[in-house]
Image (cartoon, rainbow, N blue to C red):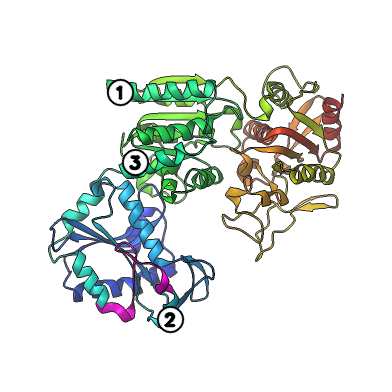
Amino acid sequence: MSEQFAHAYGYRASIAEQRSWERSLTVLTGDLHDAGLDKVEVLLEYQLPLTSRRVDALLCGTHPRTGEASYVVVELKQWSSAAPVDGTDDVVLDDGRGRRLHPAAQVGGYCDYLADFNAALGGSTDRLAGVAYLHNADDDGVSGLWDFEQSRTRRMFTGQRRGEFLDFLKGRLSTIPGADAADALLGAAIKPSKQLLDLAAQEIKEREQFVLLDEQQVAYSMILRAVEHARRANTKEVVVVTGGPGSGKSVIALSLLGELSRQGRSVLHATGSSAFTQTLRKVAGHREPRVKALFSYYNNFVDADKNGLDVLINDEAHRIRETSTNRWTPAAKRSGRPQVEDLIDAARVSVFLLDEHQVVKPGERGNVADIVAAAGRLGCEVVQIDLDDQFRCGGSRLYEEWVMRLLGLEPGGPMAWPGDEVFDLDLAESPGEMELRLRARLDRGFSSRIAAGYCWSWSKPKGDILFPDVQIGDWKRPWNNPKDTKVGAAPGRPFWASDPAGFEQVGCVYTAQGFEYDYSGVIFGDDLVWRTDRWEARPDRSKDNQVRRAAPDDFDRAIRNTYKVLLTRGMRGTLVYSTDAETQDFLASLIHV
């Protein structure tokens, strides 16, 4: 088991996991033997499609009454005791160690997901059953967990109810060999089901913030035209949509997801950003949690079926990496192939929405030239669309030009700020003043955030405490929470930009990118300073290990793009401050004219 796991997933299972297999799988195989189900096919550590989640055991066989393929998803728990968390019906404390999803809810979610993405199941859970088996527990040890409503895909058994567990298995699986059923599941296409697409279409259609204007609507219509052309002509197409900050790329992406879902097309949305993807899941799947499964990550398509999807929408495509491999990728999957080719291969039509000036990490290869070149290598037709309108920064083209010229991303050199009635730009004399002014905006009902260059170390939280790592004089504030879940009152990392409590922490480029708020505070750190007549990028002052080790030219580009991202998050105004005196004076000469 350990050897096969390492071969399949590219890393060794921990000693604790191996011990868990030894204990739980011995119990399960013994139960299958005693139930007379020796010929059932068992898939161990089965990875759910397009995720990193794994099912402990998936039993494959035939139904004793219908003779059709039948599957039982089994989640094995070694808990001896557990209790529900007060005020919830699906969160429990296992043996007092930590909060966990109720095991019946967990296995039920696995069943729903499997039905939604494995074509062999046709979008239905009819041939699925889900069981949480707490084989070390008796009924008293988990007495509070029985209040959770159970169903065929959300059943729970304890060791005390072993007889009922065996009867349940015999009611879903026959003594006939299950190899054919397992082969059907493993060989099926991976794509969202019609039922899931219907949910997405309804959910997104009812979200009033997904409204398209002007060039956004043109781009949206042109993409739908390309999708229809690819279907009629039986060709592969690549659509590249470029646009600056706030030009509506993500609104277009979500609108496409809803419309293509309504049409019954198999479609997924992908990004390279955990914070952005998790926030989209929260917004677009507000009332229908299953819709969240339509939001994936670029590196999940390394071995996807060729043209398995009708459409793959690649949002924030400037985050595309050189390859899809990482340190956990098995050797057999380390092809060295460009990630953009994995994404193009995965769908009949691949849509890439990007801003080339938001590449902030070495290894990110999301640019028009590379995408078009990859499309040519793969024999795809290419459609290019440029979004001309500006929706962030108050619609101020003047401010966007000011930022681009300030950072040397457009020719002409830094320019004095002439003022614009639709956008407020000002210099703060200190981070404390910046915070006071932005808090006043917050108190008036506007969203405000402070973000900074990655020039301070990042401490791990201790209990419910975030350490004030960002220290400038006597002003001290913590970085945004590095965890996905709350720490004290601080929101999880993906939600720093959208949760009002995020104002109390300083954000970085990775939590700000892709988001917008009314007023933005930007702290220039010592990684980018103005010296006499030019910018000087200083990797020795950066605490971002991935970026500071880059070649000097790559670091220079990444750090300028970093501040470009931070400076273009505000929709109504931006306050800037530099920790470097000469840079602060330079900014003052441009802003206070």
Q: Earlier in the sequence, mark 1 or mark 2?
A: 2
Please name the residue that numbered disc 3 is placed on: 304
Quarter of the image with the C terminus is top right
Residue 226: x and y, percent?
38, 22
Front residue of this view, candidates 221 and 274: 221
Q: Measure how far apart labels 1 and 2 are at the Cα level.
A: 59 Å
Q: Pointer 3 and pointer 1: residues touching (CB < 8 Å)?
A: no
Q: Secondary structure at mark 3?
A: loop
Q: Secondary structure at mark 2?
A: helix
Please name the residue that numbered disc 2 is placed on: 141
Please name the residue that numbered disc 1 is placed on: 235
Quarter of the image with the N terminus is bottom left
Q: Which-is-in-front pick, marks 2 and 3?
A: 2
Q: Secondary structure at mark 1?
A: loop
Residue 73: x and y, percent?
30, 61
Q: Earlier in the sequence, mark 3 or mark 1?
A: 1
Q: Which residues are magenta?
A: 145-163
Residue 245: x and y, percent?
61, 29
Q: Looking at the picture, does residue 9 appear above or below residue 405?
A: below
Corner quadrant of residue 302: top left
Mark 2 closeness class: few <14, some 14–19, many ≥20 residues within 10 Å: some
Residue 495: x and y, percent?
60, 49
Q: Which-is-in-front pick, marks 3 and 1?
A: 1
Q: Looking at the picture, does residue 392 appear above or below residue 387?
A: below
Q: Measure how far apart labels 3 and 1 are at the Cα level.
A: 19 Å
